Image (cartoon, rainbow, N blue to C red):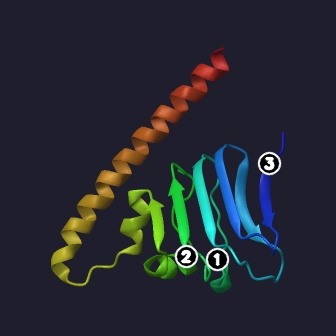
C-alpha cells in the first residue's frame, strides 16, 4: 500500500483527491512555486499537512476541503488567501479559524461556533472509528 507524502509537480494546476486514507502530506517540489488553480480535498482521513508557502495559493480560485479531520488548521498562507478565492467550500471549522473578530462583541459567537464544530468533529471521528472497527471485524 502506498502512503505518506505527495510532492506536487510544478505544472499541476488542478488537484482533486477524494476518499483517501493513506496520504498524510501535500508538499511542493523543492523550491518550486505551485500554479494551483483548483484544489479539492474530500474525505482524506489522514491528510494533515498542506503547503505553507506564499506562492502556493496565489492562483487558487476554487477550493474545497471537506471531511479531512487530520487537518487541524489551515496553513497561514492559505488562510490569508481565503478572501480572494472565488469559489470555496470548506468545513465550518476552517471558516471560523480564518475569521477574526472585528469587535469584542463577536468573540462569544466565535467561541460558540468553535465549540459546536469541535463537537461535530468529535462525532465524525467516533463514527469513523466505529466504521473502521466494523471493517476490521469482517
Q: Residue at x 47, y 68 (%)?
A: 87
Which of the two marks, 1 or 2, is nearer to us in this view? 2
Task: Provide the secondary structure element on which disc 2 rests.
Answer: helix
Query: In the rendered picture of this protein, how many numbered marks are placed on residues?
Result: 3
Q: Residue at x 40, y 60 (%)?
A: 93
Residue 50 horizontal/vertical position (percent): 65, 67
| Residue position for label 1 | 52
User: Is 22 on the left or on the right of 98, as rendered?
Assistant: right
Q: Is residue 37 left or right of residue 101?
A: right
Q: Residue furthest top?
A: 138
In-front residue for pair 38/73 = 38
How far is mark 1 from mark 2, CA to CA?
A: 7 Å
Label 1 Cα neighbours within 10 Å, binned few <14 / some 14-19 / many ≥20? some
Q: Position of residue 9 (x, y in %)?
A: 82, 70
Q: Residue 39: image x %, image y %?
A: 62, 64
Residue sitting nearer the eye, 129 or 32:
32
Q: Of marks 1 and 2, which one's residue comes earlier in the chain?
A: 1
Where is 105 relative to 112, above or below? Answer: below
For disc 3, the marked residue is: 3
Q: Earlier in the sequence, mark 1 or mark 3?
A: 3
Which x, y percent locates residue 74?
53, 68
Q: Earlier in the sequence, mark 2 or mark 3?
A: 3
- What label does residue 78 carry, if any? 2
Q: Nearer the viewer, mark 2 or mark 3?
A: 2
Amino acid at each position: 500500500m502506498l502512503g505518506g507524502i505527495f510532492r506536487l509537480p510544478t505544472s499541476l494546476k488542478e488537484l482533486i483527491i477524494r476518499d483517501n486514507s493513506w496520504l498524510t502530506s501535500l508538499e511542493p517540489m523543492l523550491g518550486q512555486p505551485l500554479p494551483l488553480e483548483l484544489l479539492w480535498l474530500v474525505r482524506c482521513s489522514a491528510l494533515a499537512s498542506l503547503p505553507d508557502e506564499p506562492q502556493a495559493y496565489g492562483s487558487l480560485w476554487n477550493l474545497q476541503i471537506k471531511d479531512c479531520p487530520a487537518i487541524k488548521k489551515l496553513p497561514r498562507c492559505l488562510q490569508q488567501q481565503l478572501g480572494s478565492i472565488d469559489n470555496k467550500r470548506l468545513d465550518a471549522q476552517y471558516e471560523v479559524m480564518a475569521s477574526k473578530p472585528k469587535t469584542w462583541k463577536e468573540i462569544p459567537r466565535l467561541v460558540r461556533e468553535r465549540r459546536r464544530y469541535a463537537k461535530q468533529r468529535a462525532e465524525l471521528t467516533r463514527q469513523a472509528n466505529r466504521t473502521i472497527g466494523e471493517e476490521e471485524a469482517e
